Image (cartoon, rainbow, N blue to C red):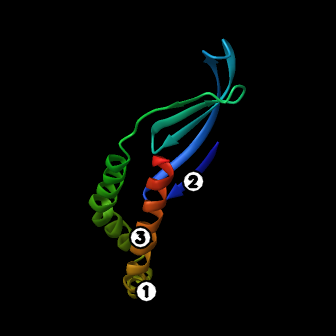
Amino acid sequence: MHEEEVSNVKTHEMQADLYCIQCREETPHVIQYINEEISTITCRRCSRVVDIDIDIMNELYDEVYQRITTKPARLSKESREDLSHFFFSLPSRVISKPYRLFRDANDTQKAIRRYRK
């Protein structure tokens, strides 16, 4: 299984033997996922592709919503585990946050472009 995380979108591939209606038999297929949703299924023998329409913007919204709503709990847990490290790392994290947001925005645009092709 190949897995890649681009911004908030997690993509991965799996291989499975499935029945191909073009080959008329069970053949190896590549199943591509965006987050936990199947986006395409490709027969490795005849290259027939089945595209499954995913609302990519909704997937992104769900991921961003999850990150925002869980942030306070994640920060609380981090501070409880090692308060000195938490306070020591806070200034550099605050300074690097604009760069990280910019990088996430670029990665998100790339993921959207790749999916819409």
Task: Give the secondary structure at mark 2.
Answer: strand
Q: Position of residue 100 (x, y in %)?
A: 43, 75
What residue would you read off at disc 1? 92
Q: Position of residue 60 (x, y in %)?
A: 36, 53
The image shows residue 31, relative to residue 107, as above or below, that is above
What residue occupies the far top of the structure in this picture? 24
Kindly check if marks 2 and 1 are in contact, taking CB atoms under 8 A apart as contact.
no
**Who's the residue at 38% across and 83% down the image?**
90
What residue would you read off at disc 2? 4
Q: How many marks?
A: 3
User: From the viewer's perspective, is 16 left or right of 83?
Assistant: right
The part of the image, by quadrant, that contains residue 83 is bottom left
The quarter of the rendered structure image containing the N terminus is: top right
The image shows residue 14, relative to residue 76, as above or below, that is above
Task: Give the secondary structure at mark 3.
Answer: helix
Q: Nearer the viewer, mark 2 or mark 1?
A: 2
> Which of pointers 2 and 3 lies earlier in the amino acid sequence?
2
What residue would you read off at disc 3? 81
Q: In the image, what residue type sits under mark 1?
A: Ser
Q: Nearer the viewer, mark 1 or mark 3?
A: 1
**Who's the residue at 34% across and 50% down the image?**
57
> Which of pointers 1 and 3 lies earlier in the amino acid sequence?
3
Task: Report how far apart the C-alphas of labels 1 and 3 lie in the structure.
Answer: 19 Å
Q: Nearer the viewer, mark 2 or mark 3?
A: 2
Q: Nearer the viewer, residue 100 or 29?
A: 29
Q: In the image, what residue type sits under mark 3?
A: Glu
- Around disc 3, counting alpha carbons within 10 Å, would you say few (fewer than 14), some (14 to 19), or many (20 or more)? few
